Image: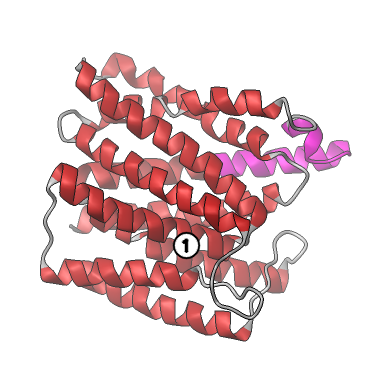
Amino acid sequence: MTTFFIIASIGYAFMAAVAILDKSILSKSLGVSSYAFYSTVFFLGAFLLLPFSETISIGAFVWALISGLGFGFATWAMFLGLRRGEAAHIVPFIGAVTAVGVFILSSIFIGESFSSMQMAGITLLIVASFLFSYEKNNGKGTPRHAGFGWALLSGFLFAISHVAAKHFYGDYSFITGLAWTKGLVGIAALFAFFGMKSEESPLAENISGSTSGKSTSLWLVLVDKVLAIAGTLAIQYAIAIGSVAVVSGLVGLQYALILLFAFVSTMFAPRFFSEHFTRKEVVFEILAIILVIVGIFLLI
């Protein structure tokens, strides 16, 4: 377990930074469809691995297509959620839904089984994810703003994508799986491209009115995409060589890091990224971090 555990942890650390960057970028005047396009079109590059991959069956192609489209549209839905809510709440909620979905779907379609200790660890990490998503709203601690509707859809689609990818990896090499399951994510970029038509302007024009602002923001987007690709590769490889449910449960680590990054940025670089936390929310976040630590210990 150690190898895929470490790789998944590194991947989630990268994705925590990506979540903060995504929210910062989407807080500008950038349209969601535009950002979804630029975030998914790069996955077409995975098809460059096809000369080094195996020949797949029609059935395998269907699984890869389900995984690719699920991932692409889950990413788009996530951005819609982030545009309407706070990263420290929206992203953990997506992960909680994903973890629950993966746990159920992997048991049904892959037949994964777990020890009692692993079951307890996965459960704690899922509970922690829901605690991270706690958000004060009109005096009630229930997540009811529009962003959580998109987050629910995103988490469900990510779960489908991960389980379909794991099914594919069970029959083919990692390179073959990566080429097909991630290359097909690029199809979502085509839909996002048409969605861009209804938005005010494309990325380079929408981020900033000044030349220096454009340059800085475009570099920010580039860094975000590099980290996203690295994080995605690490998590996909961990799924390929380990348990998809355990890897999905480890997403709680990402949320602990998102909270840490959000706090640090809010205190020291609020112009770049800042979020408001009530005292009760902080208590829930700290409790969630404790559960993440215990949950990860049970998984090792």
Asked if residue 218 lies in the magenta stretch, the reply is yes
Query: Mark 1 = which residue?
Result: 92
**Residue 17: quadrant of the picture:** bottom right
State the image coordinates of residue 61 (x, y, percent, origin top left). 27, 21
State the image coordinates of residue 77 (x, y, percent, origin top left). 54, 44
Q: Residue type at mark 1: give it.
A: Pro
Left or right: residue 1 versus residue 214 is left
- Across the whole image, how many numbered discs are drawn on residues? 1
Label 1: few (<14), some or many (≥20) within 10 Å? many
**Residue 182: quadrant of the picture:** top left
State the image coordinates of residue 106 (x, y, percent, origin top left). 21, 48
Q: Is 157 or 260 nearer to us in this picture? A: 157
Residue 66, placed above or below residue 240 = above
Q: Residue at x 67, y 68 (%)?
A: 275
Q: What coloring was used for the rendering? A: secondary structure
Q: Residue at x 73, y 59 (%)?
A: 272
State the image coordinates of residue 124 (x, y, percent, origin top left). 30, 73
Q: Is residue 215 visible?
A: yes
Q: Main secondary structure of the magenta part?
A: helix
Residue 56, placed above or below residue 129 = above
**Residue 197: quadrant of the picture:** top right
Q: Which residues are magenta?
A: 203-226
Q: Is residue 54 visible?
A: no
Q: Residue at x 23, y 41 (%)?
A: 240
Q: Residue at x 62, y 38 (%)?
A: 222
